[in-house]
Image (spheres, grey):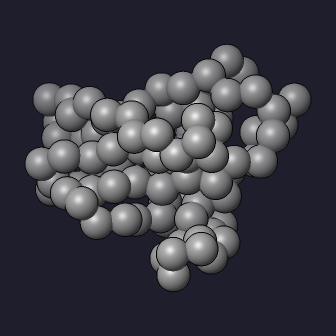
Amino acid sequence: MVKITKKSVIFTLDLDAEDVKLKGSWNDWKEEEMKKNKQGRFTKTKRLGPGRYEFGYLVDGVWMSDESLPTTPSPFGSQNSVLEVKP
């Protein structure tokens, strides 16, 4: 799930996993660790400027898109989530 506020974008995954990384076009697809909170949810808050971004989650080594957003095919045969941040 993705929540867009005036100052940030909050990425949240509620699933049973050991390791979740966020990867996106905003930083040339570099892995960013998502923190697991006490309720077992993985979260990451980012400041992103206006624009269109593609991203996904690497969950225990398996690529996943965000179910709450539209997707687009990736060059690797999987799906990337599409995030639109408005000005």
Q: Looking at this view, is 80 or 66 the one in front? A: 80
Q: Quadrant of residue 75?
A: bottom right
Count of labels in the image: 0
Tell me if residue 12 can be seen.
no
Q: Residue at horizontal 37%, vertical 65%? A: 63
Relative height, residue 15 to residue 48 (above, below): below
Tell me if residue 52 can be seen.
yes
* Residue sitting farthest toward the top: 7
Residue 46: horizontal and vertical position, in percent? 54, 26
Q: Residue at horizontal 58%, vertical 35%? A: 27
* Residue sitting farthest toward the bottom: 77
Residue 2: horizontal and vertical position, in percent? 54, 45
Relative height, residue 80 to residue 59 (above, below): below
Question: Would residue 56 appear left or right of 59 to someone viewing this image?
Answer: right
Relative height, residue 55 to residue 86 (above, below): below
Q: Looking at this view, is 31 or 2 the one in front? A: 31
Please state, as top left, top right, bottom left or bottom right, where the C terminus lies in the image: top right
Q: Residue at horizontal 67%, vertical 28%? A: 48
